[in-house]
Image (cartoon, helix red, strand yellow):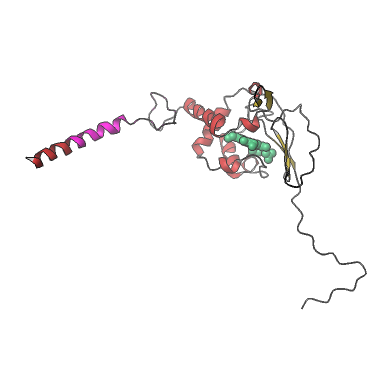
Amino acid sequence: MRAAVRGWVLTGVAALLPLVAACSGTPAGRPEGGTAQPGAATATDLAERGKYLVEGVGGCNDCHTPMKMGPNGPEPDMSVALSGHPAGLQMPPAPPASGPWVWHGSATNTAYAGPWGVSYAINLTPDESTGIGTWTEQVFVNALKTGRHMGIGRPIMPPMPWQAYSRMTDEDLRAMYAYLRTVPAKTNKVPEAVVAEPPAAPAQAAPTPGAPAAPPAQ
Ligand code: HEC
């Protein structure tokens, strides 16, 4: 009798399992279209997720949208969202990079000077002449994956945290690109970066002029 009851309970649990599996929905935090098949994210879904990654997790506005002073301190000026360092704000030469204060940033948090040179947050809007309007998805993904300008050029300089973004999945990088295609295009020509000379090799002891030649090394 007891064995028979246990058998009934086990059968009941097994019968419930497919129901439980059917009820577990989309993983939390993954926006999915209501009618979309699993794995078949629509273009809108991709851009929605991209917005979440750009504005939330990635913090791209922190540097690519100029800061203005608000009631509670600096805040991104969303009227020019993601348009990079304002062309009209010409930066004077930066103070020398020395001591513990080795780098400097502009009040807009879009221009930076340090041992690497001078870098300006670029225009990420789809403007074709001054933004990334002509970049393909692949160029965008390659830039963030490799840390090289457009995936093939010079190294991308600080403080752009490409090392962190390079660890995102290709799908997430594609989602950010999809969202960036949808933001209002802003014409803003960001100044060219200045790449500093690499630091000189440690100085060798220079021979004193007129001194006898050093004996040949043993
Ligand atoms: C801490 C500041 C900072 C943050 C945060 C930041 N960027 Fe940047 N970004 C920069 C700077 C500065 C440059 C220019 C670097 C240079 O000239 O080498 C840059 C350059 C870029 C470039 C151009 C790369 C190339 O090929 O030349 C892309 C694309 C880019 N950022 C995308 C993003 C995205 C997307 C995010 C958010 C996920 C983001 N950035 C967040 C500062 C930042």
Left/right placement of residue 166 relative to residue 190 reads: left
Say whether residue 118 is visible.
no
- How far from the left and from the top, in percent, is residue 107? 72, 31
Looking at the picture, tell me which residue is in the foreground, 84 or 70.
Answer: 70
Question: In percent of the image, x 86 and y 67: which residue is there?
Answer: 207
Q: Kindly indicate the quadrant of the structure image that contains residue 105.
A: top right
- Span colored in magenta: 12-36
Q: What's the residue at 79%, 43% (across, down)?
A: 96
Seen at 54% across and 34% down, the residue is: 57
In which quadrant of the rendered image does the N terminus lie? top left
Q: Residue furthest bottom?
A: 218
* Residue 208 lies within the magenta run: no
Task: Indicate which quadrant contains ligand 1.
Answer: top right
Furthest residue toward right: 210
Give residue 22's quadrant in the image. Answer: top left
Q: Position of residue 41 (x, y in %)?
A: 44, 29
Q: Position of residue 141 (x, y in %)?
A: 56, 38
Of 132 and 168, which appears nearest the observer? 168
- Give the quadrant of the C terminus: bottom right
The location of residue 213, given as percent across then percent down, is 87, 73
